[in-house]
Amino acid sequence: MIKSYPELVPALSGIPQSGDFGISNIFDTNEDAETSLPAGRQVQHDNVMVKFLIKIFFLLLFFNSAIAQEYNKTIIDEESGKPMLIGYCTRDVFKDTSFSWWYNSEYEMYELEYSTLDKLEGKLNSLEITIVLGTWCSDSREQIPRFLKILDELNFLEEKMTLIAVDRDKKWEEGEIENLNITLVPSIIFYKNSEEFGRIEELPKGTLEKDFAEIILNANEI
């Protein structure tokens, strides 16, 4: 299953090195070592520590900012003039008012088929799911909140699910999703041991629960 998370390895320059009041010195709890420093050297030591901690602080800010930019990115949909999601996203983005107005109503109003979901108990342990959607797409707005409600009822782990938003051409220029063969959205793709074994595209043939159960139960019989 495609998950191309960027490696963030910024250069950390200017950190004091060993022998020059580096990391090992900063955490040195030997009282003799501290008291043996001349007054001038002690001031220098304190200044290096402060500069080092400031560098760490800004480095953490950089990491948080870089990671945030990789998820829940929005661009303006040229056709509607409204924000649309693009690329990897998390469920938290649906709290944004740009998307919550349709997400919350579908999620809350959808009535689950509990009798069908009961058949899936204990059969999702090795399942991973990739969901490709378009926030500009009426079918995605309808089906994805409903399917996420199904997953919540089944206590499906969020870390085993990948959400990818695409543009109106069903593409994401910065991400390699060509091998997912997306022709319709939403596409809900099911994997077992990294191998695809089924998908629900655009609209379910019956109901989401029945289509989901059919795919999972057939896979468990193989």
Image (cartoon, rainbow, N blue to C red):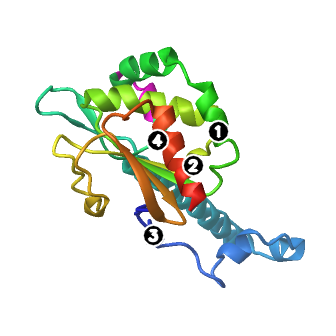
The answer to which of marks 2 and 1 sits earlier in the sequence is 1
Kindly identify the amino acid type of the residue bearing the numbered disc 4.
Thr
Decide which of 200, 5 is in the foreground and name it: 200
The answer to which of marks 4 and 3 sits earlier in the sequence is 3
The answer to which of marks 3 and 2 sits earlier in the sequence is 3
- To which quarter of the image does residue 74 belong? top left
Per the image, label 2 sits on a secondary structure element best described as helix
Decide which of 35, 24 is in the foreground and name it: 24
| CB under 8 Å between discs 1 and 3 | no
Q: CA distance from mark 4 to mark 1?
A: 28 Å
Residue at the image point whose x is 88% and y is 71% from the top: 31
Kindly identify the amino acid type of the residue bearing the numbered disc 2.
Leu
Which numbered marker is on residue 119? 1
Q: CA distance from mark 4 to mark 3?
A: 23 Å
Q: CA distance from mark 4 to mark 2?
A: 28 Å
Identify whether 138 is placed above or below 70. Answer: above
Q: CA distance from mark 3 to mark 2?
A: 43 Å
Decide which of 186, 171 is in the foreground and name it: 186
Kindly identify the amino acid type of the residue bearing the numbered disc 1.
Lys
